Amino acid sequence: MKAIIVDDERRTRKFLGMAIDWRSLGITTVLEAADGEEAYRIIAEERPTIILTDMRMPNKDGVDLLRLLRELPYLHRTIVISGYEDYAFLKKTIEYGGFDYFIKPIDETEVYERLKDALRELERENEKTAALLGNARAMNERRLLLKDSLLTQIVDRSAAIPAGEAEELLGDEWRLWQGRFYSLCMCRIQERAGRIERAFSDRKDLLYFSIVNVAGELLDFPRRGTAFRYQSEEGVVVLLLFDARDEKALCGELARTMLRTFGIRIEIALSSRRLFPQGLAEAFEEAEEVRQSVNHLRPDPDGVYAEIAEPAGMLSLLQEERELRMILTGQSRSDIKRFLSELLSGCSQAASLTTRQIVWWEQELKWLQELYAGSGRSEEDKEAAGDQGLVYWDDTGAFSLERLAESLERRLLRLAGEIGRLQGRERKETIYEVRDYLKRHYAKPLMIKDVSAQFFMNSEYVARLFKQEFGIGIKEFVTELRMNHAKLLLGNPYLKVGEIAEKIGFADEKYFSKVFKRETGLTPQQFRKTDRPDGIDNERPSGAP
């Protein structure tokens, strides 16, 4: 703690500084000032806990100083030491919150005891304040959590209370009244970016609180809107901006403030304007569409996007599946690097690499994992493979093509290693080789007798052994492989149904559609309209180990 002695007489300052055992009171620094003006400047900078002041001094006197001290934003105690037994001074001391009043000459022992009393009183006041703040903080946290939960449920169309009650609660509790125009701003934070990991590794709640708090101060919440943490997905904070003239500019200022303050970049996608509280779910979906269409090769300087970009064709890891399979089987790092270099060069030539493209590659990697290495993986392998997706950002959270290439390379190398270990074990049993052959060639016309001939075995024996081992017939196994691949390809809007049929081994589009509907209950066109990447069945055929 600190104390300050304010007196125009130097000898009085020195006497009080030496005569009182400050360290026994827990005070390590004793400051001095010769008048009220100098004292207030030092007090504002140093924030001393104890203030000893004279009353008659040049410039600002003791009364002026007491008047100023009353406005200090922290707890302190002031004791007046004066050479004048003046009732007016005593009255002002009481009026402005002084703790005690001594007449010179002073008894240092008496002053010491009153200093102890002042510090004890401050400690009790601090404890009371801490308790009140703790209770207020806990109540505020519960209140904010309720707001986060309610708005998340409305966005997800899963609110547990009727719409009317939800709207009334938003207005009464958080002043989010109906009938105002708003824009929804989806803020994405890359939690695994290095700088965020180091600063908030075990305090992710503090990260989100900081973003919400900065947004609130900058954008004048709650008068001009609100912010909440979207609870259904990590790394998302949502802003609702009311009656804003230029939402993109405001969000740009928020992004720059986060970069200056915390050294991290956030990506913000905006929806069009709607009338609150209508269309929150649709506004969130629109913002997600904006985010998915972001072209990382042509980024906004602040990372703020307000329009859905024109769709561009997507590049597939499976465009040359045979080549990729051979590369993975060979486990050559240089071949994998060459394959990825050609892939990313295609993006550069098209001047397009969207978030949707990266998500598509993640889906394809999962499918390759299950197709080529699913049956032979240990639990450790499965846990390692089930990472949190591709990494495509730098230390601050900004997009990095170099990091994306490194992440793709790691995933393919890991997959190549798993394929190598799997093949080494499974080739001990011929029937497993048959199964691998089917996985590699299901996109071609297949006859059981031709498959059996590849392994110099009787077709009936192969069919029976396959059924016994895997609990599924060869024909059904191949059909499931083809249907899973078809579901994946149907997620690409640029492939025609006929092209998909041909890619998975059907010579006739109508026959493919018939089989697809028999297996899934939907026609290919109906399945495509559902537009759900989770419709892809990442599970292997039910009987395969």
Image: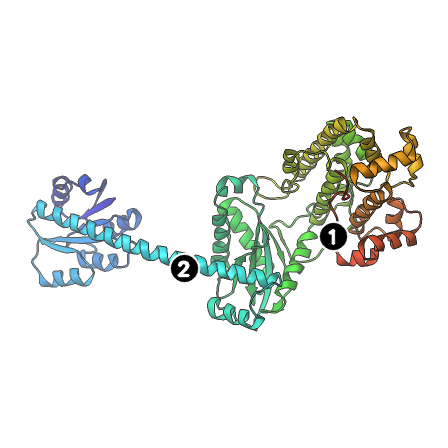
267 relative to 425, above or below = below
Disc 2 residue type (three-letter): Met
Q: Nearer the viewer, residue 471 or 414?
A: 471
The image quadrant where one finds the C terminus is top right
User: In front: mark 1 or mark 2?
Assistant: 1
- Dot 2, how many residues are within 10 Å of its Cα: few (below 14), some (14-19), or many (20+)? few
In this figure, which residue is indicated by the disc labeled 2? 139
- Dot 1, how many residues are within 10 Å of its Cα: few (below 14), some (14-19), or many (20+)? some
- Camera sees residue 440: no
Q: Position of residue 389 (x, y in %)?
A: 65, 42
**Residue in view at x 84 percent, y 54 percent:** 518
Q: Position of residue 239 (x, y in %)?
A: 56, 59
Query: Position of 407 compared to 11: left or right?
Result: right
Query: Position of 129 compared to 16: left or right?
Result: right
Q: Nearer the viewer, residue 237 or 244?
A: 237
In this figure, which residue is indicated by the disc labeled 1? 535
Instruction: Determine the image quadrant of residue 290.
Output: bottom right
| CA separation in Å, label 1 and label 2 | 42 Å
**Residue in view at x 81 percent, y 34 percent:** 436
Q: Position of residue 111 (x, y in %)?
A: 11, 48
